[in-house]
Image (spheres, helix red, strand yellow):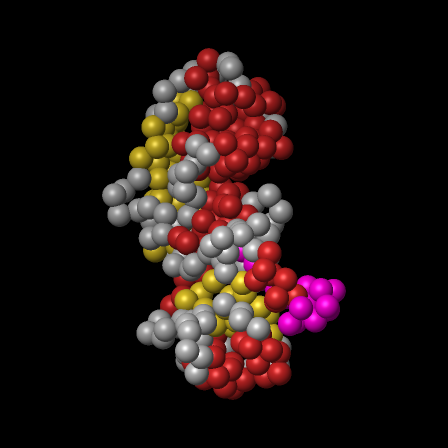
Amino acid sequence: MDWKNSRIDALLEQALVEDQAASDTTTSVTIDADLRASASILAREDLVVSGLGAVPRFLEIFARLDRRPQAQTRFEVVSHPEIFDGVRARKGQVLAIIRHNARVLLSCERVILNLMQHLSGIATNTRRYVDAIHGTHARVLDTRKTVPGLRALEKYAVLCGGGTNHRLDLASGILIKNNHISLGGGLRTALAHALERRKVGQRVQVEVRSEHELEEALEGGAEAILLDNMTPQQVAHSVERVKKESRWVPTEASGGIVLENIRQYAETGVDFISVGALTHSARAVDISMSILAE
């Protein structure tokens, strides 16, 4: 993750602005402006880490927002060489130590924790799904079911958990779904138009929900197949049919797939399994920050 990317920078800045971190009333009236402190970011449960790189960026952006001397002082963010985004951390492990002005640490505490808890929650959730299909051919994909504005960060968290990113946005690829088919004159017509009008290098994927639609898609030249809301048995049958093609056509299963049944889908031989729950149903993990005066 490029934490200095302008898009990410804007997201982190907005988080600080939303919390009015540079106008922290309580801290300004209770804490000495020159006090330095050390903050320990602690995992309070087993988790997969994501978002560590945001910590120094939050502090740098805070210094941009608050021009008072306290925000401009030297700071240091230190973590053990074995702790980095994507690693499994155990309950009680220190993820990072920040040494900075005490007022700055208190003002940025909640924003830092909010993001790390959210991203680490997604990474931890993703790792459970990836572990559940270990040893199979399939790969776990994320979806566009993300919090508006946070997609880039949430998809990064999926990577930290061992998952694979699907389309980042609507411009990233062609996926003909049910509504495109119904509004575009039927599957054959919509597929023909997509193959004719696509840009160079774009692959055309078609969502199918039945054996009949699968045949239409393959006969029409679909280059990837999304098997939507099918049972594991139906997916297995469809995968076998696709494998009879003389060309390679990747298959993906989606719809109603949860941790309890993903292994069944993976064992069908499907190439990819997309799971919206990686992002839309991930629980924030428990991470805390302990701040002590130096």
Furthest residue toward front: 196
Q: Nearer the viewer, residue 145 or 27?
A: 145
In depth, the one of 94 and 269 nearer the eye is: 269
Is residue 179 found inside the magenta-colored segment of the image?
Answer: yes
On screen, residue 199 above or below 250: above
Question: From the image, which quarter does the N terminus lie in?
Answer: top left
When asked about the image quadrant of residue 143, the answer is: bottom right
Classify 288 as above or below 63.
Answer: below
Q: Is residue 79 above or below residue 292?
A: below
Q: Which residues are magenta?
A: 173-189
Percent from the top left, x then y, of residue 8?
A: 50, 36
Quadrant in the picture for residue 162:
bottom left
Residue extending furthest top?
69
Please say whether residue 81 is visible from this viewpoint: yes
Q: Quadrant of residue 213?
A: bottom right
- Residue 54 drawn at (x, y percent): 44, 37
Q: Position of residue 62 (x, y in %)?
A: 50, 25
**Which of the pair 237/244 is nearer the observer?**
244
The residue at the point 54 percent across, 21 percent down is 65
Residue 254 counted in the magenta span? no
Q: Residue at x 57, y 81 (%)?
A: 215
| Residue 101: image location, x then y, percent | 42, 22
Question: Closer to the camera, 247 or 56?
Answer: 247
Q: Which residue is depicted at the point 40% across and 18% down?
A: 73
Residue for point 31% across, 35% down: 78
